[in-house]
Image (tube, coloured by chain):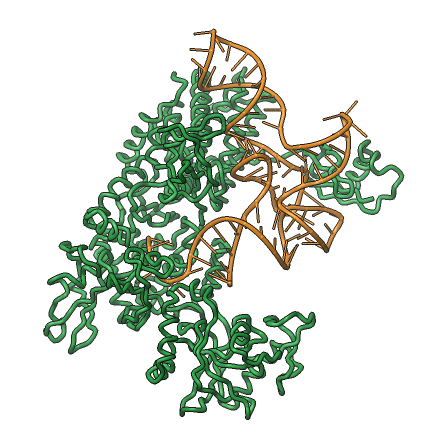
Amino acid sequence: MSTQYNFRDNETKWQKAWDQASIYKAKETAPKYYVLEMLPYPSGRLHMGHVRNYTFGDVIARYKRAEGYSVLHPMGWDAFGLPAENAAIQHNIHPKTWTLENIHFMKEEIHSLGISYDWSREILTCSPHYYSHEQKIFLDFFKQGIAYRKESFVNWDPVEGTVLANEQVIDGKGWRSGAPIERRKLSQWFLKITDYAQELLDGLSHLDHWPEQVKTMQINWIGRSEGARIRFPLLEREETLDIFTTRPDTIFGASFIGISPDHPLVESLAKKSPALQTFIIECRALGTTQKDLDVAEKKGFNTGFSVQHPFLKDHTLPVYVANFVLMDYGTGAVFGCPAHDERDYEFATKYKLPILPVVKDSHDKPLPYQGEGIIINSQFLDGLTTEEAKKKVIQKLVSEEKGVAETSYKLRDWGVSRQRYWGCPIPIIHCSHCGIVPVPEEQLPVTLPHDVSFDQPGNPLDLHPTWKYVDCPVCKKAAERETDTFDTFIDSSWYFARYCSPHSSQPFEKKEAEFWMPVDQYIGGIEHAILHLLYARFFTKALRDCGYWNISEPFKNLLTQGMVCHETYRDQSGTWLYPHEVEKRHEQYFKIVDDTPVKVGRSEKMSKSKCNVIPAVKIVEEYGADTARLFILSDSPPERDFEWTEAGIEGSWRYINKIWRLVTSHLSTLKTVELSNTPSHFTEKALQIRKLTHKTISHVTQDIEKFHFNRYVAHLREFSNVLEEFKPIDTSECWALLEALTTFVVIISPALPHLAEALWAELGHNSFVATQPWPQPDSTFLKEEVITLAIQVNGKMRGTLDISPNLKADEAQSIILDLPFIKAHVQDKTIRKFIYVPGKIANVVI
RNA sequence: GCCCGCUUGGUGGAAUGGUAGACACAACAGACUUAAAAUCUGUCGGCCUUUGGCCGUGCCAGUUCGAGUCUGGCAGCGGGCACCA
């Protein structure tokens, strides 16, 4: 028997055997368990972040299978998106060709990892077999009023004449043209996610197995706030201006009105004011991201208009156009109360507007004070708390018909139009006579034309000579197709449903989907905490309301994994170097080609731009899939970032071989006993081994259940460390060792499926370890008769005592106070308190 | 700027409010070997007057018999901010 484990032969051998036996094909037999990793974008090569993601999913899938569940574990491709178009422009390759090539390589690499996927359910979002159903769903949303059109802003590159993604705008300039980007209004498609704001918020409280931080982020993103809508009459026109505020209690501190540069009123005012036009242009140059708007200096433009204060007869407020007021939130207009709002304070100071405090705080904190307190300077509100004042002022507004109580959400409707080629075509026809006409269902899918050119800037669909020209389905006159495509977030908002019946002629079969859904365990990066997860939740509810199914939440349990990081290297000139370009000698790094010293930077998220990437394929070739999987599981808890190191992968490789030797070296001994033939008597050593075996089963089961994969590996190592030392000398000890090793091979199998399969065969089995049931611990071995109790004096550890965990407090006290090291510390001092937590601790307080 | 996290030995990390550092990696010392690799054994938070004691979980406070863990404040690092996925 070789002392080195041959991973190359074994891994391909077992992968083939599993495929042939189709043991990972999902069957609809209860109880079910749906484990899903986030749909990957086919970027080209598998990186360690993928390996980590799929390894976590595979451990869970294999464990649940062993637990007796019918497991659905599918995989597919988020195949539309910007990078394919960039590749088309840069390398003159068709987005489809580029995408399919990438998928080809990545699929092979995933396969080499031995992940237990049911490949018969593979999904490809760029295939008409997938996106035709997406078009059908969109048409249903349109019928249901969930999809609608409105104008909104895009990043417009005036030189290229194209719309840019936020990531293509660098410091306010186009990434290729360098031209300053304008915000330009376009008519686009939106989904009414705001209709679901309250339900999306309420649903979070039932997602007990989602990380708290993800739920908090979503709560803040939805941003429900209760306040008031107040109607201010304009003095200069026969119009009123509605504002939304969460602080109606500070109405007497109001010193100005701020309206968004995109407010309808501003549009009409700007027609007569070139100065205002200039100001609006300035605001629109700020960029479209929230951060740009937040960081920008607060600026305003005095319109010369003013409004009447609702409660102060002779008091008017000037109306400013303010760059920090968002049209998308509330009514696009606010009243400014500088004493109690930071932005208003900055604004009022700048434009020398009055700052009147109306909330008194008990600690006399400096202004602006945004907390709670007692109302002052506010007539009928004086003396009330801010909470009481809110209620009272709303009552008064309502009775005088000047306003209403209102709940507002920060959540905005989801803009799904993209002016790009490589996405799902929006199945709509624009007819000059009939207006917006949905493509009739029997004409679906609207397929992407293949013959497109990326030679000129702009959307190739819009520039295509024939594709967009069609006859109107209603009046049969000449009309044009919608040339925008969908945001790729749509593709990933329902794929989990399609997996349930991937070959259906409908988007999915209700029966199958309701059998498998919700996803029992969803796994992916924390970077998707808000957008993807919120969109998928919204889609699930919208599909329900269109009659597709009776499911409201798609993901029951959520595991958000951290990033995979690696050290960064730069040569003397500051150029980034790949790990394979450097060599380590005596704690120092050198560039291999010219032997010059290398500067080592801190560990950062693996990225191509910093060259700190390790291709998964290289690791699998050098060490095998099981070694890679083991390292990824053993070093960090899943939620945290993972640091990839050469030493770490080496250490895992050594352990793989250690396991191989541990089991194979005992094979001849183990042949002398059979598990079905339990000895009537066990030696003390045999019992100790049995106790450890069953405690280990108990530990690793809990570890996997709680996703403490690093502790799972630690417990495996503790177990094997003891087994290595164990030399059986009689039948009962041989039997205990066989029980231990058989158990060991089964419990390593979710993590190390190939090695476990090889060892299972060595142990003489004809079955797959992958289909073995999970072992159950014998509870008689889990009880402890004696535990080590920590003894403290005044909370400081002073020694330990081995006693029964069931010892009564008074008995424990007399024993403990009699201990020499306790006597030495207590001496003649009085014992003020004696704290005893059975099985945990004793604390003598003096 | 706003929202959400994270911070424990040389390193990755472990620890239902109850013995801080499990399990590893690295390093050092030793065994085996002609030698190397592999393997095995030992040491491994800091300090001191070392069968013992003091300090120590980013920093400053607080709650508690007892805080890495809970609360408040601060710093550093990271994720998200609606057209990257």
Residue at 28 percent across and 36 percent down: it is A19
In the rendered image, the vertical position of residue A291 relative to residue A657, given as above or below: below
In the rendered image, the vertical position of residue A143 relative to residue A376, given as above or below: above
Q: Out of A772 and A441, give the one closest to the viewer.
A: A441
As drawn, the residue found furthest toward the front would be: A573
Give the total number of marks visible in the rendering: 0
Quarter of the image where the N terminus of chain A is located:
top left
Residue A26 x/y as whole percent: 32, 45
Q: Quadrant of residue A817?
A: top right
| Left or right: A370 as drawn, with respect to A420 | right
| Left or right: B82 as drawn, with respect to A737 | left
Q: Out of A390 and A668, give the one closest to the viewer.
A: A390
Residue A547 x/y as whole percent: 31, 66
The green one among the chains is: A
As drawn, the residue found furthest toward the right would be: A828
Q: Quadrant of residue A50?
A: top left
Residue A232 x/y as whole percent: 47, 86
Residue A172 x/y as whole percent: 36, 61
Residue at 24 percent across and 61 percent down: it is A160
Q: Out of A253 and A137, give the one closest to the viewer.
A: A253
Quarter of the image where the C terminus of chain A is located:
top right
Residue at 46 percent across and 73 percent down: it is A299
The orange one among the chains is: B
- For residue A104, say whether it is visible: yes
- For residue A58, say whether it is visible: no
